[in-house]
Image (cartoon, helix red, strand yellow):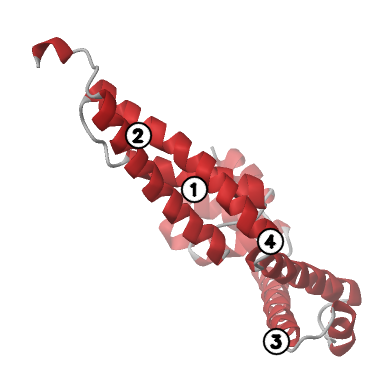
Amino acid sequence: MLEELIERYSQYSDGELMTVYLNKNGYTNEAQKALETVVERKGGIQSLKERYDKIIEKEDEKLKIHEEVIKLYEEGLTQNDINSRLDSEILSIDEIKEITEETYNSFELKKKDEKIKSSTIIGSIIGGIIGGTTGGILWALQMIYSGRVFYIFAIGLFFISYGFIKFFTKQSKNNIIVFITIIISVIFALVLGTFIYDILGYHGPNKHLQ
């Protein structure tokens, strides 16, 4: 068992190993012994702490650069302009560029997703009608064959409408037009389903008892 623990801890990164070490009092004596063995093999606790501190310092610097990119993006700067404004004594130029690219692209995608275009409106209408009609039929069927209303299925109506609308618009519910259309589509599905049920009535297994 001891050898298995030593082998397991040997595969841990410095960050993972330090996390376990800081909480070692919650582990068994055998686990603590295995941990001490691995730590010594990796240069001792002082060496591990120094490496761990560098990891934390680097992660803090990445967060700082990330926040700075957001600030500069909101000021309207381009990706190249942002890169030219940033420097770090801890991160390399390539690491800074990677953070800038990921953050910038993330905000650009969010901006594109929330933008209201003609395709947003047209796609929402088409998807809303198809999703609402599909959902309405399914809503009616549950009442027709069970004679009951399972309101939890209303959640399914939301996802059905959202799925069709997102398919036609290629935009998410974070877009205000898409979100409003989803709500309207779900309401339409509920009304349509109830209307169909009122016309066809109950056709479940207990129909002959009514």
Instruction: Judge by depth and name the residue closer to the eye, 195 or 70.
Output: 195
The residue at the point 28 percent across, 24 percent down is 200
Residue mark closest to the camera, 3 vs 4: 4
Q: Name which residue type carries label 3.
A: Lys
Q: Which residue is mark 3?
A: 71
Of the numbered discs 4 and 2, the one sitting upstream in the chain is 4
Helix, strand or loop for disc 3: helix
Of the numbered discs 1 and 4, the one sitting upstream in the chain is 1
Residue mark closest to the camera, 1 vs 3: 3
Mark 1 Cα-neighbour bin, 10 Å: few <14, some 14–19, many ≥20: some
Relative to 122, say whether 101 is above or below. Answer: below
Residue mark closest to the camera, 4 vs 2: 4
Q: Name which residue type carries label 4.
A: Ser
Give percent across and percent down for residue 197: 28, 30
Q: Residue 86 lies in what quarter of the image?
A: bottom right
Alpha carbons under labels 3 and 2: distance apart:
47 Å
The residue at the point 21 percent across, 12 percent down is 205
Helix, strand or loop for disc 4: helix
Can residue 174 be seen here? The reply is: no
On the rendered structure, is 99 left or right of 182?
A: right
Give percent across and percent down for residue 107: 70, 71
Alpha carbons under labels 2 and 1: distance apart:
59 Å
The residue at the point 56 percent across, 42 percent down is 2
Q: Which mark is residue 139?
A: 2
Mark 4 Cα-neighbour bin, 10 Å: few <14, some 14–19, many ≥20: few
Alpha carbons under labels 1 and 3: distance apart:
50 Å
Mark 3 Cα-neighbour bin, 10 Å: few <14, some 14–19, many ≥20: few
